[in-house]
């Protein structure tokens, strides 16, 4: 398929998807370094794994765009969100993952409407993977007490007991 055969709106979905995936890469990479400064190596490792997964999504999008004859260009990355603790970071990540899930759902539906089966399948595979990421993120939040309103204090107290408060970094 060449660029002439691709609906302009599909190209817009691809460009936005690349921006969102690169935003996620930037966010998870930053958070990995931040929580490592807090002394939470396990969380840093998980964020690094997420960084790799999101980078793989970005690479697939770039490859797909190139196969369509389109020069990839991320239009705008969102600013990295921050929070004073792991639960807050994860809550921000849930917002970003929801943006990705919703974007891929909309792109998949649009491609189905215009009968673009190849791009519908491409977006569907990313949608499925992001839904899985969202489920993993929800499970991680539940493991930590389900967010600020339920059980957050116990998690925070455990982390503070094992960390030197002078090493706490924020941005």
Image (cartoon, rainbow, N blue to C red):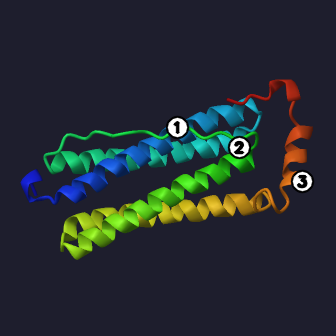
Q: Secondary structure at mark 1?
A: loop
Which marked residue is nearer to the observer: mark 3 or mark 1? 1
Residue that badge 1 annotates: 79
Relative side of 140 to 47, left or right: right
Relative side of 109 to 27, left or right: left
Decide which of tag 2 and tag 1 comes sooner along the chain.
Answer: 2
Rendering coords of residue 65 (x, y %): 22, 48
Rendering coords of residue 99 (x, y %): 48, 57
* Real-space Cα separation, disc 2 to disc 1, in angstroms: 24 Å
Judge whether 127 appears above or below 50 on screen.
Answer: below
In the image shown, does 39 or 71 lie closer to the viewer? 71
Q: Secondary structure at mark 2?
A: helix
* Real-space Cα separation, disc 3 to disc 2, in angstroms: 18 Å
- Res 108 → quadrant: bottom left
Residue that badge 2 annotates: 42
Q: Secondary structure at mark 3?
A: helix
Residue that badge 3 annotates: 154
Which marked residue is nearer to the observer: mark 3 or mark 2? 3
* Real-space Cα separation, disc 3 to disc 1, in angstroms: 30 Å
What residue is rendered at 92% in x and 39% in y? 161
What residue is rendered at 85% in x and 47% in y? 156
Rendering coords of residue 139 (x, y %): 67, 63
Which marked residue is nearer to the observer: mark 2 or mark 1? 1
Q: How many marks?
A: 3
Relative side of 149 to 140, left or right: right
Decide which of tag 3 and tag 2 comes sooner along the chain.
Answer: 2
């Amino acid at each position: 398929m060449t660029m002439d055969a691709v609906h302009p709106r599909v190209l817009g979905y691809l460009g936005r998807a690349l921006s969102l995936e690169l935003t996620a890469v930037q966010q998870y990479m930053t958070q990995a370094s931040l929580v490592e400064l807090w002394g939470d190596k396990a969380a840093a490792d998980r964020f690094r794994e997420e960084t790799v997964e999101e980078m793989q999504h970005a690479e697939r999008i770039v490859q797909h765009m190139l196969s369509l004859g389109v020069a990839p260009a991320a239009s705008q990355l969102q600013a990295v969100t921050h929070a004073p603790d792991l639960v807050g970071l994860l809550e921000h990540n849930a917002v970003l993952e929801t943006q990705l899930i919703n974007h891929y759902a909309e792109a998949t539906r649009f491609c189905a409407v215009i009968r673009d089966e190849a791009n519908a399948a491409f977006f569907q595979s990313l949608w499925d993977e992001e839904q899985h990421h969202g489920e993993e993120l929800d499970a991680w939040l539940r493991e930590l007490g389900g967010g600020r309103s339920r059980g957050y204090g116990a998690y925070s107290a455990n982390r503070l007991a094992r960390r030197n408060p002078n090493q706490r970094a924020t941005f």
